[in-house]
Amino acid sequence: MKTIAIINTQSPFNTPAGRDSLDLALIFGAFEQPVTVIFLGDGVYQLLDGQNPEAIDTKDYLSTMKAFELYDIEHIVCGLDDMKNRGISVNKLSMPVEALPNAQIGELLNTFDHVITM
Amino acid sequence: MASFLILVHSSNYACQSSRSALKYAESVVNNGHDLKAIFFYQEGVCHANTLSSIPTDELDTTTGFKQLNADHNIPLLLCVTAADKRGIIDDQQALEQAQELKQAHGNVDPAFTIAGLGEMATIAAVTDRLVQFK
C-alpha cells in the first residue's frame, strides 16, 4: 500500500488536466490506496460551487467529484493563500475542504509515498 | 536498490521533458534499480504513434524507450483512454472501427502495451518511487 497525494494546479476547463486528475484519484481510490486530493494555484477554481460548464459546451466532470466519498477519498485540501489571492472563501466551495496555509502544505507533502501533480 | 514507476505526460516531439524522462529511465536501469514500468498518459501517448516521423538529426525518444523495452523488458504502458482520444489505436481497434474510420490498420507501435490507469495504480502500489515528466 502507498499513500498518494494528487495535486491539481490548473483551472477546470482550459485543459483536460482536472478531468484526468479526477480519473487518477478515483482509480487509486478503487485500488484502496489512501488518496489525498490537493488544490493549489488556479486549481482551486475546480472547487468553486455553482459552475455551469454546459454553457461552454464542456462536460461537467466537477459533479463527479461528489464520488470522492464513495471511493473513501475524504481528505480534500486546498491552499489557503491561493484561495485568498483569488478572492474565494471556503463557503463558496462545492464540498468540505480543509484550507491550509500554503507553507503547511509543503510539510504535508512530505508525508506521502507518491505525489502526482496535474 | 529502489523500484521506480515513471509517468510521461508530454508528447514525444517538442518537449524536453520527454528527453528528460528517457535519460532518467536509462539512468535508473543503468544504476541497477528496478524500473517496473513507464506509463504514458495525457499527451505522452503520442510516443506510441508509428505514423510520427522525427528527422534523423533530431532525438527520437520513442526509439530510446523502445530500446529500453527490447534490452531490459521495461513495460511501456499506454493509457487506453488517453490514446483513443488522440487517435492512437492498435490494429484490433482499427479493425473494429474500420467501417467507421475507413482505416484497416492501427498506429500503435507493437513495443507498447495497451493498458489503463488501473494497471498503473497497481504498479504504483508496490513501487518505491514514482517520478513524473511533464
Image (cartoon, coloured by chain):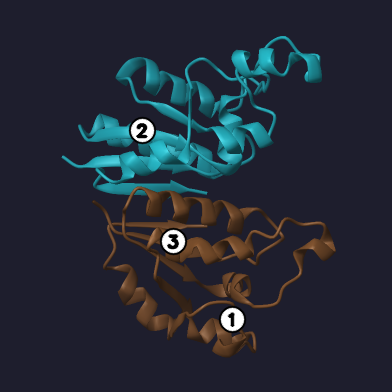
Chain colours: A brown, B cyan
Residue holding disc 1: A93
> Residue type at mark 1?
Leu
Q: Work out whether disc 3 and disc 1 sit on a shared chain.
A: yes
Label 3 marks which chain's residue?
A
> Residue type at mark 3?
Leu
Quarter holding residue A84: bottom right
Rounded to the nearest angstrom, the CA distance separating label 3 from label 1 is 19 Å
Quarter holding residue B94: top right
**For the residue labelled by badge 3, is the local secondary structure a helix, a strand or a loop?**
helix
Q: Position of residue A62 (x, y in %)?
A: 62, 64
Dot 3 alpha-carbon crowd within 10 angstroms: few under 14, some 14 to 19, many 20 or more? few
> Residue type at mark 2?
Ala
Residue located at (28% from left, 48% from top) = B129
Dot 1 alpha-carbon crowd within 10 angstroms: few under 14, some 14 to 19, many 20 or more? some
Residue holding disc 2: B37
**For the residue labelled by badge 2, is the local secondary structure a helix, a strand or a loop?**
strand
Label 1 marks which chain's residue?
A
Viewed as shown, does residue A105 lie left or right of B55?
Answer: left
